[in-house]
Image: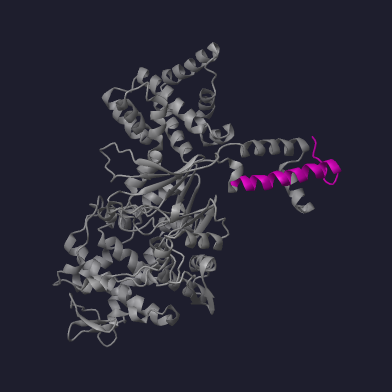
Amino acid sequence: MRSLAYLKLMAREYPTIKAASSEIINLTAIQGLPKGTEYFFSDLHGEYEAFVHLLKSASGVIREKITETFSHIIPEKEEVALANLIYYPERIMKQLELKGVADGDWQRVTIYRLVQICKVVSSKYTRSKVRKKMPPEFAYIIDELLHVDYNDDNKRVYYNEIIRSIIDIRVGDKFIIALCELIQNLTIDSLHIIGDIFDRGPRADIIMDELLRFHDVDIQWGNHDISWMGAATGNLACICNVLRIAISYNSFDVLEDGYGINLRPLSMFAARIYREDPCDRFVPQILDENIYDAVDPGLAAKMHKAIAIIQFKVEGQIIKRHPEYEMSDRILIEAIDFARGVVTVEGREYPMLDKFFPTVDPKEPLKLSKEEGELLRTLQLCFMHNELLHKHIRFLYSHGSMYKCYNSNLLYHGCIPMREDGSFEEIMVDHHAYSGKELMDYVDRKAQNAYFMPEGSAESEDARDFMWYLWCGAKSPVYGKGKMTTFEHYFIEDPSTHKEPMNPYYRLSMKEETCDKILEEFGLPKKGSHIINGHVPVKIKEGESPVKAGGKLFLIDGGLSKAYQTKTGIAGYTLIYNSNHLALAEHKPFDPNKESTPKVSVVENMKNRVMVADTDKGAELAERIADLKELVAAYRDGVIKEKVE
């Protein structure tokens, strides 16, 4: 039973029995519709071209709809052309206009075909919902075309007259673009990003702009996202980390053109300090050429080394401030014998591959030089007072979290830390041991504190350091490995030191009973629920499958990032959950000059078609309907008076 005060608030929106009853009928009807299609992506890593294509093509589903609708009517070449038009309407229209192809006859046929596809993708939604997604200037016309009765001769004439008028007044191109964008919008009802939007790839900022424009999206943070979020708070280690990774993958465009971060102070510092040093261990991997900010590889290597050395220093300072992190063995810059050129790791000495450290004082290895300190302060200001970056970071906070339970699916990026015996691993922070769901909730709150607590407060500083721990800490649920061996990769040849032991979760989660335990921990039923996970690339070419634990677990990091495609053999997965089934779309490496339809495999059929009433949204609607019924009863009993005009 709702309180009278609550019902009176509802009465402002529904002032009469008629208004409340009408909404009850509307919401009940919505419950009887099939659920919308959900799309799950993971580990985008700045690969904006590939991701934007997957978004616009609905991971191949739009191509499927075209084939289903027109396969016996038009040749495949025209199907491909129609698909490309829907994906990139403005670009294709300009090309066709230059060729003189987009005349009145072509526009008439194209509008007819687009309306047919639009009917197919909108069929499971209410007329009201579809209309809200239409561009206002064409909403009435599109609505009419979608609901014409073709069996009525008069209506058919009406339909043809609408299209003729659109072409005659020369808005056919704009109308075609509007239809294409509506089809894109209707095909994906909701979007779930399972972490790691940032790092490695060329333009994470463009991906963020696309997500900001999308109508229904949620994000589960990955360790790379956390690192950028930490950098935006001003944490020096996180700032060094995101710069180091971007420079190491030659991703200057995202830093300078994307976010306007001034790297000139760093480049000048590096060029002077490492003038005679070739910095061979720090030559960047060039996966993508910079379009706007080409940097000489030799200078990039010097910048890479400069920021890496600074990072090792400020990380060591964080570890000293936080003994509770239990990471003292990771201050390897203090374990170097500078006179002999060796470093001691886990009790064993290794020769250093690089011995030139002009800014490191052997007596105080963690102390920043005066120039390093000034450089860091300049870089810190670039991150803390960056309007576009903070617009994106605020979106990560407003639409993101450590995990999400939605429609019987548990979504998270990394892992739920576990011990070898299958119990949840505890982390002792703030004088309390956290594990399982409680740990994820704690981390979520801590991440919020890092960004939103008052500048300079003890809580804020502690939370900002914790953001760095989440990036690489042994018990971090977004990292999930025993240690991060960045130092060893740079300076030690022995590959055994490069290994990063995985948390037992990654082995144990292959078992159904472990997945059931995790689902139960988060309040989800064992039957019919799934875990959807990213972070660890699935090596398809070695025979690995993304479907684990008898269909309870989906690992959907398939290598959208170019850095992983040689390991995975493919270019990523999309998990698609519609009212009939769960399906996996397997993608080929993106080539803008080739038509590439993903391989879509159904991995689980629903016993009965899933309706809105069966979803979390349906539960919300049921609660709303119950409230409205109480309001109607209150009106009828005279407890609340109707506002009858």
**Place of residue 230 in the rendered image (x, y in percent of width and height, measured from the top left):** 42, 66
Q: Nearer the viewer, residue 220 or 437?
A: 437
Please tell me which residue is depicted at 59% across the width and 41% down the height of the picture: 612
315 or 392: nearer the eye?
315
Estimate the x, y position of residue 454 in percent, counting from the top left.
52, 70
Colour treatment of the image: one colour
Residue in front for this viewpoint, 26 or 205? 26
Q: Is residue 573 magenta?
A: no
Q: Please tell me which residue is depicted at 41% across the width and 29% down the height of the picture.
A: 68
Answer above or below: position of 154 versus 577.
above
Q: Quadrant of residue 29?
A: top right
At horizontal 42% and vertical 17% (from top left) the residue drawn is 168
**Residue drawn at the location 14% of the way across and 69% of the way down:** 278
The magenta region covers 617-645
Coordinates of residue 555 in the picture (x, y in percent): 40, 55
Q: Is 641 inside the magenta-drawn segment?
A: yes
Q: Would residue 626 appear left or right of 139 to someone viewing this image? A: right
Quadrant including the C terminus: top right
